[in-house]
Amino acid sequence: MDNLPEQEKHQASPGLGEQVSEQEQSCPDPSQRKGQTRTILETLRSKHDQKILRLRAEYLKCLEEMKDNEALENTRWFQRATQASLLLGTKDLNYAPIGTLDGSILGSGSSSVEDAAVLYMTADEFAKYSKENATSMEKPIVIPGEPEAPPEEFMARFIDALEISCARNSITVQDLSLSVTDEDGDAADSFRLVPANTVIAQIKKPQKELSNKLNTLPINLLDLQDFNLVNPPAFLNEPRYQLLRYIDERVEADVRQQALPKRQRVKNPTLMPGKKHFQVRRPADVAGCQRFTIYAQRGAYSGAHADSLNGTWVKCLKGLKIWIIFPKLHDGEDQSGFESQGSDWIPQNPEDAQMIVLTPGDVLIMPAGEAVVHAPITAEDALMIGGMYWDTQTICAIVGNMGWILENPAVSNERNLLQLPAMLEKLNAFVHEYPEKFINENLDKKAFLKEWKQAHDSTTKILRQAKRAESKAKKPIKSKVPQKRRK
Ligand SMILES: O=C(O)CCC(=O)C(=O)O
Ligand SMILES: [Fe+2]
């Protein structure tokens, strides 16, 4: 292992905002002298640097061993380990500068709110901040907190739920042993279906050290349903964050209508009243995005991407996740590089990658209306829950970002949203039905509807073009045998 930088020598430290202990009085760093509280960043560094530097060293060791081994060099593992090690930097670790609000009970972060790349605040502070800055929440926000149960208990609940709900099925797994390219030299898929029992057996064994053995590479489960492991964060109860749910319900209500006798059907149904007494079949991608669970083993790395519905929250229940962000992405040539390369992209200057570190109890919010490009690396086996949401106060930006993603499909790692046309249609109707939900003191109804029309029309146009391009690509080659005429 290479010589580890100074920061690795820190020992475990008190929690956020705790006072510095007696032993540290002699510490040359003035911020750590007795009586003074550490900044959030200093606390995070002292807790996590060592673990993250060890992970980086292990990536480098694996890469060294894979060198000149043709079979291994073509695996997704080689590619992802290369990218992840670069994103973790070559010298000191590069944390995203942390800002806290004036008078925050969390103390100070590491920079001013203006210069910060991530804001830390309590749930109460978030409630106030999100009211006062409804249309200008641009930076990711961390709400640090204590976990509701010990990580091992969450893990036991998760395994139990997986066994009960999924045991007879297969689970989509990000499998890094797969090749980067297929036989034709085209980009190959990095996901495959694996029997749930095999997956469960693998995740029961904690990943302690990275190795190049293809059958023990870190797996990542990104396509899991919500298992009700814990309540979602309370901020989601606010009416303005219910929008995605309302629109999804209306799309579903349309589908449910089809199952009713004709005379009972209504025009433009909202939610069907009452409990859901019958099942409907529909492409359920949006419903699936509203709440999810993710489980990744130490060393898993997803690649840079933006979430297609932009507006994502995640909560860590177990482990250590390094949520890499790229605050300088839009400043230079990196933007076009990312748009074309998507998850294979890393910034020209890897030092532009900045880390947000998440541990049990922490909630991260990537605000709806900001397509925050992120590249999560799992530093310790991590269980998280999450969901996607929309915000009435930023709906024009949300729909604009969706247009950008449709134009640059490489930037999102999700399948094309099958329900997007229906959702846009329902959203447009909803906006005209309840315009007052979308306005605020800075934006009156007339100005809002004008802005909405622009965003809606532009994304609808992009969507139509994308559909046309898709159906052209799929058009079957015309058979030479004349088709039978239908009677
Ligand atoms: O944890 C991961 O590997 C990816 C998770 C992610 O990007 C998300 O939940 O938006
Ligand atoms: Fe994501």
Image (cartoon, rainbow, N blue to C red):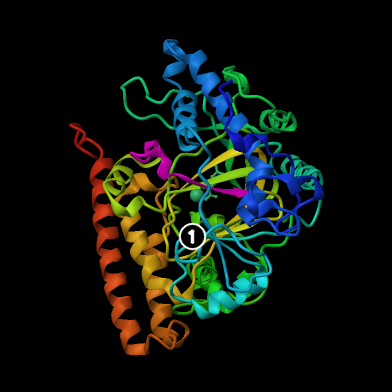
Left of 38 or right of it: where is 110? left
* In the rendered image, the vertical position of residue 224 relative to residue 363, given as above or below: above
Q: Identify which residue, 340 or 244, lies in the foreground.
A: 340
Q: Position of residue 187 (x, y in %)?
A: 35, 30
User: Tag 1: residue type?
Assistant: Ala
For the N terminus, the quadrant is top right
Q: Position of residue 375 (x, y in %)?
A: 48, 44
Question: Residue at horizontal 37%, vertical 68%?
Answer: 397
Residue extent of the magenta highlight: 344-358
Left of 316 or right of it: where is 119? left
Residue of label 1: 116
Q: Position of residue 75 (x, y in %)?
A: 45, 22
Q: Position of residue 102 (x, y in %)?
A: 58, 73
- Quadrant of residue 17 within the rendered picture: bottom right
Question: Residue at horizontal 24%, vertical 63%?
Answer: 461
* In the rendered image, the vertical position of residue 467 relative to residue 480, given as above or below: below
Question: Residue at horizontal 74%, vertical 42%?
Answer: 12
Q: Identify which residue, 471 or 77, lies in the foreground.
A: 77
Can you see residue 447?
A: yes
Q: Magenta includes 40?
A: no
* In the rendered image, the vertical position of residue 291 relative to residue 197, given as above or below: below
Picture mark count = 1
Can you see residue 296?
A: no
